[in-house]
Image: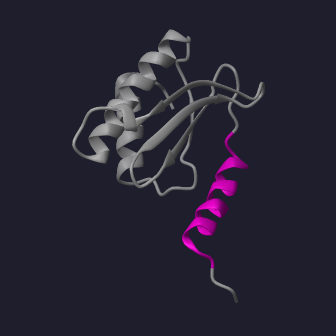
Amino acid sequence: MQTMNKQERRARRHRRVRAKVIGTEGRPRLSVYKSNTRLVAQLIDDAKGITIVAVSSGSEKGKTPRERAEAGAATLVKLAKEKGVKAVVFDRGGFQYQGTIKAFADAVRAAGLEF
């Protein structure tokens, strides 16, 4: 049996998540990608194939990645409400639901998006 590296394992988990999570116009997909330095989130309408809103935590203020992710969540929710989005489906991108990803999701819920 051949072993998989970290990126291959994440890609496999992401394919499994994407098989179940589909964004529509009324309820777009909140896709999250996490690198070592920043977190990038997008609201995507899969039916039309367009990105409605995108935010990067690299442009946010904060000392830790978690603080920058929470600030990015507030920015994302503000932009989403301007576009008329109230509810989303969460696509964790194959990342485990802990740490920065969980903090981002909790901040999005606290700011007013429903999922």
User: With respect to residue 12, does 51 lie above or below?
Assistant: above
What residue occupies the far bottom of the structure in this picture?
1
Q: Is 15 on the left or on the right of 77, as rendered? A: right
- Residue that appears at 44% across and 43% down: 39
Residue 94 horizontal/vertical position (percent): 57, 55
What residue occupies the far left of the structure in this picture?
63
- Residue that appears at 31% across and 46% down: 65
Does 58 appear in magenta?
no
Quadrant (top left/top right/bottom left/bottom right) for the N terminus: bottom right
Q: How many marks?
A: 0
Residue 101 horizontal/vertical position (percent): 42, 47
- Residue that appears at 54% across and 47% down: 92
- Residue that appears at 39% across and 37% down: 57
Q: Which residues are magenta?
A: 4-21
- In this picture the colour scheme is one colour
Residue nearer the viewer, 103 or 59: 59
Residue nearer the viewer, 59 or 7: 59
- Determine which quarter of the picture holds residue 74: top left
What secondary structure prevails in the magenta region? helix
Q: Is 66 on the left or on the right of 20, as rendered? A: left
Residue 88 horizontal/vertical position (percent): 56, 29
Does 19 appear in magenta?
yes
- Determine which quarter of the picture holds residue 61: top left
Residue nearer the viewer, 5 or 114: 5
